[in-house]
Amino acid sequence: MVSKSKMESLLSERRFLVSAELTPPRHHDLEKLLRHARSMADCVDVVQINDHLLSQARCANMAVGHFVKQEGLEPVLQFSLRHKNRIALQGDLLGMAALGLSNIIILGGYPCAIGSDPDAKEVSDVDSYAAIELTRRLTREGKLFNGDVISPAPYFHVGTIDFPCAEQAIAGAMDRLSAKIDAGASFIQVQAVFELASMRRWMAAVVERGLHERAHFIAAIFPFAGVDRLNFLQKVPGLVVPDHLIERVRQSGDAEGESYRITLELVRGLRGIPGLSGIHMRSIGAEDWVPRLVEDAGLRRAA
């Protein structure tokens, strides 16, 4: 029996997980990134490493995960299906296993058209449901995607993402979410929100369906520092940044201070929503805030 990862153990023990995100650079020098990772070591439980964020060519997150683990942190790798066919996906999974990495978030990824190489061809080989199911089968049965058996079977703790949606679309969203859990997702990371009402509404539907008893739910936030960052985030597919939030920061007279206060309000509010098992800070552009947010929100890492 393969032992659980630290992340899986903490979630199984019903600890409130604290996670932060690292973005690999568009070069191969990782010293600055690793310094940032070290600065968060005492305040987060896990560190997520995104996969060519916003469709930009970046240092491979598996390499980053390897070095982050050597620093004593628990890495979680995001795997984007945008640029992986089933051969590449299996190769990356086996590479993870060889490096002793086991936590993975499977997602679709942003379109190539918005990234560094807009003419790049996207891969539409396996969807997230199939990728989750095939990865779970690889863990449980040692079966590669074509059915070939390998021994010993590698171990993966598999999660995926989902998006809070408008109230009228919640029923269908819950059906799709249930299908992801049926496929083998052990945890669901909920895309970042900038106001609490939509997350409360969405998580209420999750709890009503009992989905929080079948998988762990982690809420994401985007700490931001100023109006320019909010304007940028407003253009990111899948994010909804209310205009009134931008106006609040603009009129505050202290854009950075007001941005921090809003972020802290979100963190504290998310902590109290029933059904949530953790919080993930996508600290792009406000990386130095993570230790302070954890302290001010009373989050303290679980272990």
Image (cartoon, rainbow, N blue to C red):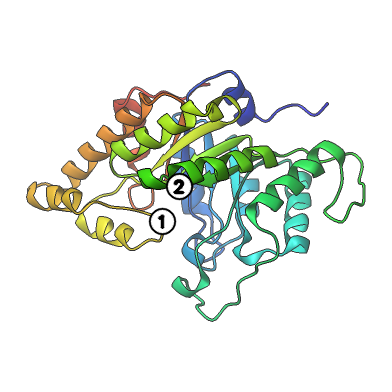
Residue count near mark 1 (Cα–Cα under 10 Å), binned few <14, some 14–19, many ≥20: some
Q: Is residue 171 left or right of residue 155?
A: left
User: Between residues 43 and 122, which one lies in front from this camera angle?
Assistant: 122
The residue drawn where x is 49% and y is 60% is 53
Q: Earlier in the sequence, mark 2 or mark 1?
A: 2
Whether residue 95 is visible, yes or no, is: yes
What secondary structure is found at the residue carrying circle 1?
loop
Residue 271 drawn above or below residue 233: above
In the rendered structure, which amino acid carries the disc numbered 1?
A: Gly
Q: Is residue 7 left or right of residue 88?
A: left
The residue drawn where x is 47% and y is 41% is 171
In the rendered structure, which amino acid carries the disc numbered 2?
A: Phe
Using the numbered discs, state the Cα–Cα distance from disc 2 to disc 1 in whole angstroms.
7 Å
What secondary structure is found at the residue carrying circle 2?
loop
User: Between residues 125 and 50, which one lies in front from this camera angle?
Assistant: 125
User: Which residue, given by chain and number where applicable, does mark 1 sit on?
Assistant: 238
User: Which residue, given by chain and number where applicable, does mark 2 sit on?
Assistant: 163
Image x and y of residue 238, in percent = 41, 56
